[in-house]
Amino acid sequence: MMDFSVGMSRNWDGFDAGEEVAIRTLEKLEGNPKFLLLFSTYHYLKNREFEKILEGVHTHVSPKVPLIGGSIAGFITREGCYTRGVSAMSSSYENMDVAVGIGRNTKLTPQKAGRDCAEQIKNELKYSKFKQKFFITIISAAEVPNLPLIGKKKVVNVFGINFFLKFFNEICALTQIGIGRDDTVFDSFSKELEGFIGIGGASCDNLSMEKNRQFFMNSVVSNSIVSIGVSCDKEIIVNTSFGLSPYGKKFKIDKLSGGGYVLEKINNQPAVEEYLNIMGWTRDVLDERLYRKVFYYPFVQENSKKLLQPKMLALVYGNKFVCAAKPIENKSAEIYISSGNSLLKSINDLFTSQKCNSAFLVSCGTRLETLGANAYLIKDLLDKKIKGDYLTIYVGGEYSKLNESERAFMYQSDNAILLP
């Protein structure tokens, strides 16, 4: 049986947390680990605590074991729901070949980063005799630009901001700060991995969009895509669900700039002003806690049979929005919304009628914010649906590839790799 084993730690010291999470993950394995997925909340970002976590892990796990991961907003295991701590997942299954890849400079050369990562995985697994192939990928999310005399603010309305936006795309690319470009990175990556299915997430902090890091083997990196590719002899199921419903409000996207990420006009009006009119809000809602309001209302432009591809308004610069993923110009958009009950239904929809032995799940970080203390309802549902161990991570954007034609970068989604 192909089991996943999950461990976690809430120790404040990075080295001790790394040791504990490794021990608790390995103690459930009957053989040597074939890989390790490692995730940490942002609390360990300072004083090289991420590096210390890896040092602690590698006192019990060989540095040669394929390892990827990154910073996340929170996680759920059988032990509980946490917004602080370190978690890991592994497997010792023998009929499995594993490869890892990394692509760097995701905000400067996103397509190249995706291709580089995918090619490493393809080359390592091209002689594998196992036919079922899947991946798990982590990509650096957006980071709020640190503007001179302004600092890191999500809402900026000062003289000169329009001038800055004229060079927004170039400045963000060269400094590797700002929009994550992970939509482009994932598209390039997933296209290269023909015959693979898989899921992933954008590494983040507590959704303040200030810092994020990725883990690759024995290193802590930034502005990177890190991925694990697996070939095995077991049937793997990848599912995506949303729990979203139309909010009854629509608009047309008329003008984009900044490489396609800056939304200037909707309904032929300044974007921010018109959006507030549509929602019936005043500008007071646009403050530094922007994600607690706007993030709950993603918009959808194009549908496939299953993947809605919800997009998010990330920053407010003057009367313009900066989007986390490129919208489509001259195309209508519809606003969607979710509720506590619909989030539970979304998790339930991930599971088929077949029994699920183990699972790895990637969900939107705003869902953790929405549920708050009620996140235990998700845990209770997962406990019932999954026989063995599981790990759910909460991230700043989600990726899914169900087949060659259905692959997407999304927000407000739930994604799972299921082992029947």
Image (cartoon, helix red, strand yellow):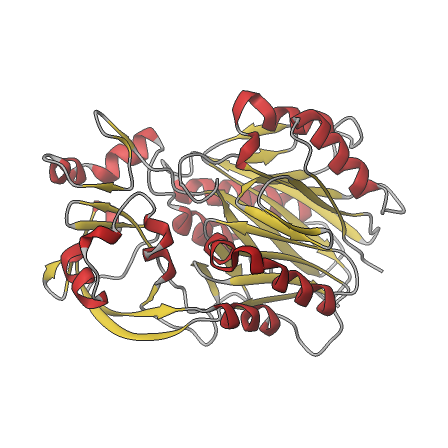
Q: Write down the quadrant of residue 227 in the picture.
A: top right
Q: Residue furthest front?
A: 373
The foreground one among 368 and 36 is 368
**401 lies left or right of 383:** left
Counting from the top left corner in percent of width and height, residue 17 is at: 70, 32
Q: Residue, x 12% and y 36% (percent of image)?
A: 163
Q: Is residue 377 above or below residue 124?
A: below
Counting from the top left corner in percent of width and height, residue 21 is at: 74, 37
Instruction: Tell me if I can see residue 33 in this picture.
Output: no
Counting from the top left corner in percent of width and height, residue 28 is at: 85, 47
Q: Residue, x 47% and y 45% (percent of image)?
A: 114
The foreground one among 418 and 385 is 385
Q: Is residue 362 above or below residue 51?
A: below
**On the rendered image, what quadrant is the C terminus found in?**
bottom right
Q: Residue, x 38% and y 38% (percent of image)?
A: 143
The foreground one among 216 and 396 is 396
